[in-house]
Amino acid sequence: MTLLKSYIRSKKLLFNLSILLFSAFLINASFFTSPRIKVSTPIKNNEFLLEYLSIKYPDQRFENFIYVGVKRQELDLYLNGNRIISYPVSTSMHGAGTKAGSDMTPIGLHKIRGKFGSDAPIGGILKARKYTGNIASIQTNPMKTGEDAITTRILTLEGLENGINKGGELDSFERHIYIHGTAEEGLIGQPASHGCVRMKNEDVIDLFNRVNKDMTVIILNN
């Protein structure tokens, strides 16, 4: 009888251990498949990126800046040299490029030229960088709405590299390249824009409130 009880207890122990291991597996699996979550505590520095930028732009200090990774479809905000928050974005469906009329997202060194839409509600449609009084219907499914609505907030970008994103038909500011909210939130995380950097509406408000005019913005097709 004692042996039988020991056998039953051991079976129960193995069963409970199996349940715990399976639960841990599910938790880990949900972590890796969940959408990217914004974090407000510092993330470990991307030392490779910072080293690359310091070599490519030796006269530029990279402490407070925005980094847009085109291939990663992600925008990172760095403050005091630390990457403190990451947002999913959508850059151009046509890839990276700088020529006027290409509808591509420009690469290289930029700065925030202006901030617009502080009076707009979430989803508010902006035209000519002004709130129109209309609210967009936000599409959260991965589908096109047929309109390239600019919503909620705008950060205009000015190119800083002659012959790359500044001057002539390559000029990012003249091409009206913005960081802005979109009605096509379901497409965030994949190339979908006509050259701008699109963000979810709550995310663009959060970013807008964290940054100032003249902050450096670096866009890389990496």
Image (cartoon, helix red, strand yellow):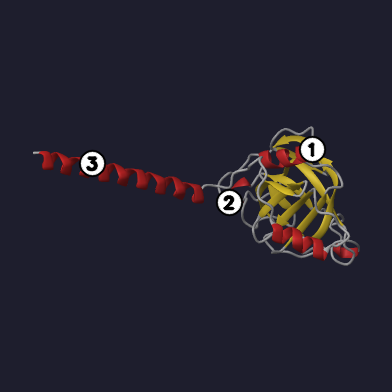
Which residue does the image show at 45% across and 50% down from the upper left? 29
Q: Determine which of the numbered discs, if any, sits on residue 12 in the image.
A: 3
Q: Which element type, helix, strand or loop, lies under badge 3? A: helix
Vertical placement of residue 163 versus 159, above or below: below
Q: Residue farthest to the bottom?
A: 163
- Mark nearer the N terminus (3 vs 1): 3
Q: Which amino acid does label 3 sit on?
A: Lys
Helix, strand or loop at mark 1: loop
Going from N to C along the chain, the mark reached first, 2 or 3, is 3
Give, as a three-letter code, the residue at label 1.
Gly
- Judging by the rendered image, the residue that carries numbered circle 1 is 117
**Residue 107 visible, this orientation:** no
C-alpha separation, residue under disc 2 versus residue under disc 3: 50 Å
Amino acid identity at mark 2: Met
**Mark 2–mark 1 CB contact (< 8 Å):** no
- State which tag comes first along the sequence, 2 or 1: 1
Q: Do the residues labelled 2 and 3 touch (CB within 8 Å)?
A: no
Instruction: Work out whether residue 186 can be spotted.
Output: yes
Percent x, y of residue 22? 35, 47
